[in-house]
């Protein structure tokens, strides 16, 4: 294939995926419609994830006024926010709860989008950017976990970084060194310390949010250009106007989500689900307390890592990661019925591992 | 005399001042890992030279420790420098004699403590926190459902006001958006009729 033909094909491909000719007021607002059917609730999940991201940005900026990213002061500054800053406990709780709710919303959004086959041509870029957003969201969760610099934060981060290094044992030749280099780059020094905290802080507060905004812009742009996918096999009996009908419903969902988040953040301290010794300041000289584990949204990979051989989990994770990124091409000809079944199985796995992972672990390990 | 008694008590082996039986019982009963910070000032207990441990006590603190260790009967106000407010509360309510006796039956400790005491004011009595393995001096640590119920009742006014503000904001915004949509529709219809 010569260069000209390649460029022409690329132009055709991108033109179909990013139809900028639709970028006008009529197409985006006046004439835009949303299908109404039994799975229509799935159309609100992306907006919900966006809402929680906005909450994260606002509360995160508020926390930045007081948070100190140093190993000597990080824990004390978080304690100061919680105990002494007016409304500090509420803002911190909202940040913590919204991160969990955002990840839950993103996961359900991914599963419903998959079940509705909303990744099908010409929405491949929307899907791939969505998967990227999922990875960035998990990255935000992982980097944010370290910042309070308490026992569970530092020890769980150590385990997470150690897992990266262990990948090297399964790679051939010079590649075997790469995971160690990646770990050392993220860690910044021989053990988890000030350099690690500084890097995680930079990642959590600047780099990942910027990446998130960039990919989110592409994702939303793509969604706006293509509109909502049909979602079901049979043509929808009814369609509603995006503006104002769907938009007002979307805002109402945001209002309900805000109230739920507000009440939960006001009434249930996020830390109450874990044993209190895990939230004491990290002391490298003290013994590691029991019960160290990652946030609940990593249980789906944490418990398999505890139960199965590392290489099995590595292979499965690799397959799942590649599968997720290549979904539009792998499941191009798969029926929506099969996709719904697969989505239900995926959801079941996530729910079982999150709620009963520890029981399953005890069952296997005694 | 009191000074000598205090000094003698302070020089007793630390194990006499720590109660691992209670620690083991709470862990077994609650299924939650705890540490010595439940009753002591330092998470690793009284042994050591860190703040709140025996090796760091001033002579004044040693006197207080001695007085606390000689409080064998209930009702004596104590302020042991190695115990936190909950540890001192237990010594004050039960006395050291009873505390040492209960080591043989640690499950009875919670029954002997006053049921209505709530040192951190989180709505969960200290005895319940002891059974649950949550910290009686940390209002962010407790059974999530009990905390939810208590905080919900405590913040009912703020929640009602926020709900009213959110509902009013959404109502106003949705009407404004509908109005905007209706106005543009009228304009469109007018333009269409003019062109027709």
Image (tube, coloured by chain):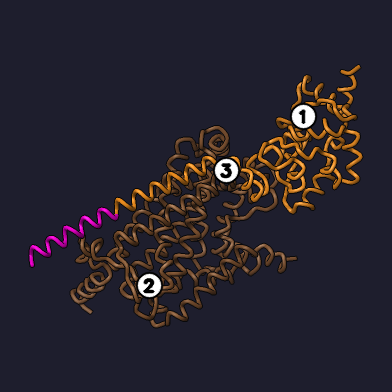
Q: Which mark is residue A119?
A: 2
Measured as percent of width and height from the top left, residue A3 is found at 20, 74
Number of other residues with Cα within 10 Å of mark 1, as a class: few under 14, some 14 to 19, many 20 or more? few
Shown colour of chain A = brown
Give the number of the mark in front: 3 or 1. 3
Residue B118 falls in image quadrant:
top right
Q: Circle 1 — which element? A: helix
- Residue A299 visible from this viewpoint: yes
Location of residue A124 with respect to A270 vertically, above or below: below
Q: Which residue is mark 1?
A: B55
Number of other residues with Cα within 10 Å of mark 3, as a class: few under 14, some 14 to 19, many 20 or more? many
**Which residue is located at x 64 percent, y 64 percent?**
A357
Asked whether B55 falls inside the magenta stretch, the response is no
**Is A111 placed left or right of B81 in the picture?**
left
**Is A363 placed left or right of B14 in the picture?**
left
Residue sitting nearer the eye, A259 or A83: A259
Q: Which residue is mark 3?
A: A149
- Residue A219 visible from this viewpoint: no
Badge 1 vs badge 2, beta-carbon distance below 8 Å: no
Location of residue B77 with respect to B136 vertically, above or below: above
Q: Chain of mark 3?
A: A
Measured as percent of width and height from the top left, residue A70 is found at 52, 38
The residue segment tinted magenta is B178-196
To the question of a shared chain for discs 1 and 2, the answer is: no
Badge 3 vs badge 1, beta-carbon distance below 8 Å: no
Q: Chain of mark 2?
A: A
Shown colour of chain B = orange
Location of residue A128 with respect to A207 vertically, above or below: below
As measured in the structure, the alpha-carbon distance from the residue carrying label 2 to the one carrying label 3 is 40 Å
To the question of a shared chain for discs 3 and 1, the answer is: no
């Amino acid at each position: 294939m010569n260069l000209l033909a390649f460029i022409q094909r690329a132009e055709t491909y991108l033109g179909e995926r990013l139809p900028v000719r639709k970028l006008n007021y009529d197409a985006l607002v006046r004439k835009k419609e949303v299908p109404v059917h039994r799975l229509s609730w799935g159309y609100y999940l992306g907006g919900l994830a966006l809402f929680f991201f906005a909450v994260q940005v606002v509360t995160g900026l508020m926390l930045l006024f007081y948070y100190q990213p140093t190993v000597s002061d990080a824990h004390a500054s978080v304690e100061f926010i919680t105990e002494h800053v007016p409304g500090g406990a509420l803002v911190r709780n909202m940040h913590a709860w919204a991160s969990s709710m955002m990840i839950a919303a993103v996961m359900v959004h991914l599963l419903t989008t998959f079940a509705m086959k909303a990744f099908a041509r010409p929405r491949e870029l929307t899907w791939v950017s969505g998967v990227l957003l999922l990875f960035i969201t998990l990255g935000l969760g992982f980097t944010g976990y370290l910042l309070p610099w308490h026992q569970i934060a530092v020890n769980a981060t150590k385990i997470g970084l150690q897992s990266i290094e262990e990948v090297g044992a399964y790679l051939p030749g010079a590649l075997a060194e790469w995971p160690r280099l990646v770990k050392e780059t993220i860690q910044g020094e021989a053990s988890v310390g000030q350099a690690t905290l500084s890097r995680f802080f930079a990642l959590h507060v600047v780099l990942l949010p910027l990446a998130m905004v960039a990919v989110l812009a592409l994702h939303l742009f793509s969604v706006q250009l293509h509109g909502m996918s049909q979602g079901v096999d049979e043509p929808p009996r009814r369609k509603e106007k995006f503006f104002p009908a769907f938009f007002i419903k979307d805002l109402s969902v945001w209002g309900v989500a805000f109230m739920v988040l507000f009440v939960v953040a006001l009434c249930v301290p996020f830390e109450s689900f874990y044993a209190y010794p895990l939230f004491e300041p990290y002391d490298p000289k003290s013994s590691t307390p029991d019960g160290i584990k990652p946030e609940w949204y990593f249980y789906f990979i944490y418990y398999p890592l505890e139960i199965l051989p590392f290489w099995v989990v590595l292979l499965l994770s690799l397959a799942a990661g590649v599968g997720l990124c290549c979904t539009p091409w792998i499941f191009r000809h798969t029926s929506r019925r099969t996709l719904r079944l697969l989505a239900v199985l995926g959801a079941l796995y996530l729910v079982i591992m999150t709620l009963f992972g520890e029981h399953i672990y005890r069952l296997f390990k005694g | 005399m009191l000074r000598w008694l205090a000094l003698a008590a302070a020089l007793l082996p630390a194990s006499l001042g720590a109660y691992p039986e209670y620690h083991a019982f709470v862990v077994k009963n609650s299924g939650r890992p705890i540490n010595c910070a439940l009753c002591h000032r330092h998470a690793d207990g009284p042994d050591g030279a860190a703040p709140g441990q025996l090796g760091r006590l001033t002579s004044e603190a040693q006197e207080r420790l001695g007085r606390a260790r000689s409080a064998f009967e209930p009702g004596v106000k104590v302020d042991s420098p190695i115990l936190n407010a909950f540890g001192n509360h237990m010594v004050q309510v039960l006395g050291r004699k009873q505390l040492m006796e209960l080591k043989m039956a640690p499950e009875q400790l919670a029954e002997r403590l006053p049921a209505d005491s709530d040192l951190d004011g989180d709505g969960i009595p200290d005895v319940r926190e002891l059974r649950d393995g949550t910290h009686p001096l940390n209002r962010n640590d407790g059974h999530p459902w009990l905390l939810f119920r208590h905080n919900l009742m405590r913040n009912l006014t703020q929640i009602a006001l926020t709900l009213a503000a959110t509902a009013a904001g959404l109502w106003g915004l949705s009407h404004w958006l509908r109005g905007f949509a209706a106005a543009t529709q009228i304009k469109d219809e007018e333009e269409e009729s003019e062109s027709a």
